[in-house]
Amino acid sequence: MADCIFCKIAAGEIPAQKTLENEECVAFLDIHPKAPGHTLLIPKKHYPWIWDIPDALFVKLFQTAKQLAPELKKQVGADYVQLSVIGKDVPHAHMHLIPRMLSNTSVLP
């Protein structure tokens, strides 16, 4: 999609602090982080909503999130990594991986 900021990041047209990239998806640091290490994980192909993603890619995204979480936790010294799928600000399917401390009572990003 020509005017989608996440499509432009996936295509390398807009700079981003990428933390992981494979054939199907890319992860990068959120420019408005809710916590240190707050990462967005997106499919490279445009899908407006997470529920629009084909099953095989849906599984791949969650596998990639599972791969990313321990590294995020380690890098920032977090107790756990919160996974959120909200999809209200950018109409491109994405996940938020937010490193958290047990002392942090916030639930949503």
Image: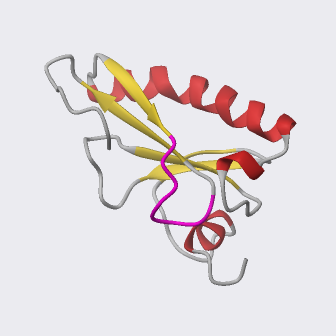
Residue 8: x and y in percent read: 62, 73
Q: How is the image coloured?
A: secondary structure
**The C terminus: image quadrant:** top left
**The N terminus: image quadrant:** bottom right
**Seen in the image, is 97 located left or right of residue 58?**
left
Q: Is residue 5 above or below residue 38?
A: below
Residue 9: x and y in percent read: 59, 67
Residue in the foreground of this view, choosing between 85 and 81: 85
Q: Quadrant of residue 38?
A: top left
Q: Quadrant of residue 3?
A: bottom right
**Rendered residue at 69%/37% (across/down):** 61
Question: Farthest residue toward the left?
Answer: 103
Residue 58: x and y in percent read: 75, 37
**Seen in the image, is 36 located left or right of residue 58?**
left
User: In the rendered structure, does residue 99 fall within the stretch colored magenta?
Assistant: no
**Rendered residue at 17%/26% (across/down):** 105
Residue 88: x and y in percent read: 47, 60
Question: Farthest residue toward the bottom?
Answer: 3
Task: Tell me the magenta residue range.
Answer: 85-92
**Rendered residue at 48%/48% (across/down):** 86
Principal secondary structure, stretch drawn in magenta: loop
